[in-house]
Amino acid sequence: MRSLPAVRLGSPGIRRIAPATGYRLAWLQLAIVLVAGALHAASMAWPFPLGASALGLVPGQPAGWLQLLALALLAGQLDGAQNWRRGAWLGGLFAVAMQCATSWWLFISLHVYGGLAAPLTVLAIVLLAVLLGLYYAAASALFVAFAPVQAAWRALFFAAMWLLAELARVQFFTGFPWGEGGYAHVDGWARPLAAWVGVHGLTFIAASVAAWLAFSLLAPRTRWRSALAGVLASAAIAWLPVFNVGDVEPDPALVRPMSVTLLQGNIPQDEKFVSGTGVATALRWYGEQLQSAKGALVIAPETALPLLPRQLPDGYWQALRARFASGDQAALIGLPLGDFNTGYSNSVLGLKPALPGQAAPLVQPEPYRYDKHHLVPFGEVIPPGFHWFIRLMNIPLGDFNRGAVGQPSFAWQGQRLAPNICYEDLFGEELAARFADASQAPTVFVNVSNIGWFGNTVAIDQHLQISRMRALEFGRPMIRATNTGATVIINRLGEVTHSLPRHTRGALNGDVQGRSGITPYAWWAGRFGLWPLWGLGLAALGLGLFFRRRG
């Protein structure tokens, strides 16, 4: 008896199929996209304590090949979807699984520290994933409806639609692009391109490669040619570092490294704002460390001092200002600022002598100040109509004032240090605004964070990969002082050179080498933001609509 030809799942050629077989195929597709979404989340930072180093699966480290596999699985399913509605469901379910597996640690902040009932916490996390998943559902539906026929163009169209979904997640409703696919490639073959196209460009490139491989494997006659082209393209990209693509040269004035001391207080999150325990511990320990630190620059993390300056013990703030009013040291300290009438801000204050190496002046200069611009929704800014949700939790949350984009850097020892707070380093296009004027561009990035809200979880590793990507994009070191980790020094190549063990109390001492020069990404993102990428995605969509109408 002649055997039936093999078909791939969802092939348009299958129109009449036994109901039982159709159900099995539907459930198999569902399982594939859900597993693929979870794999995509794991590619940013392998979340399990056990790994397989031979496969590049190392706890806490990115796995670029896993991200390619995840998107290839999705692209293969979308390529065989019967209609755009089916495509929307598949893409949306992939995204929901991806988002839940990426940011499951929100359960710790909402339930463990916030006291929100466990069922409501799970519901909130799933609803967030569903809302973010709508972008990817729309992108998948557009792909199924308007994708070109030829495999290479179809792969580029898939990548363009995926890019539009990622950009929407960045910019709409305050933005929450945590877990974007490009971060999986902070190590590996695509990393040299970060200085040219940024993480969103890496997402587009990775999506193109993944879809290309998927579509080629589904078309056996072109498999060998596509595989050969993929090998050659990967080899070309791998050789880019040899030619210093995206490199930035140090300014001769910045050749001398600067010594830094990064403080990690490890104050338990459930005690951090309790006056009798965490507050007292923080004031004592950070006060001692700021007085005795040896680095030319001392950095204390986000809300290291959990009180307003006027709420500090008598003489406490005056002693710190006097400590750095003379000599050859400066400090950046995270603390809240403001009052009831003008509002509050999550801020960093910088203390330094007016004339390094000289005696303290009679009148001390006003401290440098940086106010957080990109506030955390439901944490530092409450969306209209959601105050009822905040009242369900026992967390000191509220509406904070927003700082400006592109605030001045902290000048010290010939360096221009650009602070950012918590997940602000997730928004590279906002950091790029500081590079619009090359003469005032930062030479070093400084991130101060408190990831203690999320426990000892993969959130720490994910945030570290985000900071590493920013270093690659801008060709700048990133130094990170955090409450519980990861407190590290990252060089301009995105490599961690010094680190403290997470969830320990201590001071990290090391040197940081400031850089000048402007990477291509810093140049165009600093002037145009994300508009060039929006233009790329929308142009691809327009071409798809045009040719589909002609067809």
Image: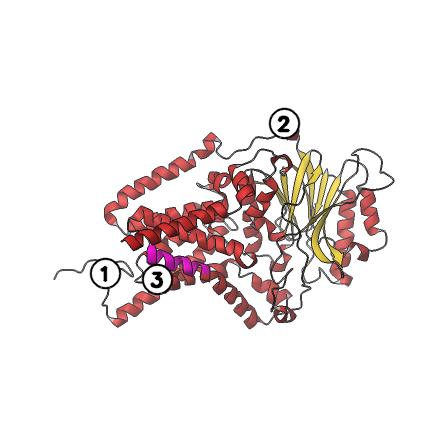
What is the quadrant of the N terminus in the image? Answer: bottom left
Q: Residue at x 39, y 35 (%)?
A: 236
Which span is picked out in magenta?
A: 135-146
> Is any atom of residue 65 visible in this view?
no
Instruction: State left or right for residue 309 relative to residue 485.
Output: right
> How far from the left and from the top, in percent, is residue 346?
69, 54
Residue furthest top as drawn: 252
Viewed as shown, does residue 286 lie left or right of 173? right
Q: Which residue is mark 2?
A: 252
Q: CA distance from mark 1 to mark 3?
A: 16 Å
- Residue plotted at (72% across, 43% down): 298
**Label placed on residue 84:** 3
Magenta stretch encompasses residue 236: no
Q: Is residue 144 magenta?
A: yes
Q: Residues within 10 Å of mark 1 (few under 14, many from 20)?
A: few
Give the residue at mark 1.
13
Using a 10 Å C-alpha cutoff, classify the residue at mark 3 as few (fewer than 14 neighbours), some (14 to 19) or many (20 or more): many
In the shown orientation, is residue 85 left or right of residue 311? left
Whether 161 is drawn above or below 240: the answer is below
Residue type, mark 1 in image:
Gly
Q: Secondary structure at mark 1?
A: loop
Earlier sequence position, callout 2 versus callout 3: 3
143 vs 257: above or below: below
Q: Secondary structure at mark 2?
A: helix
Query: Where residue 248 appears, x then y in whole percent?
Result: 55, 33
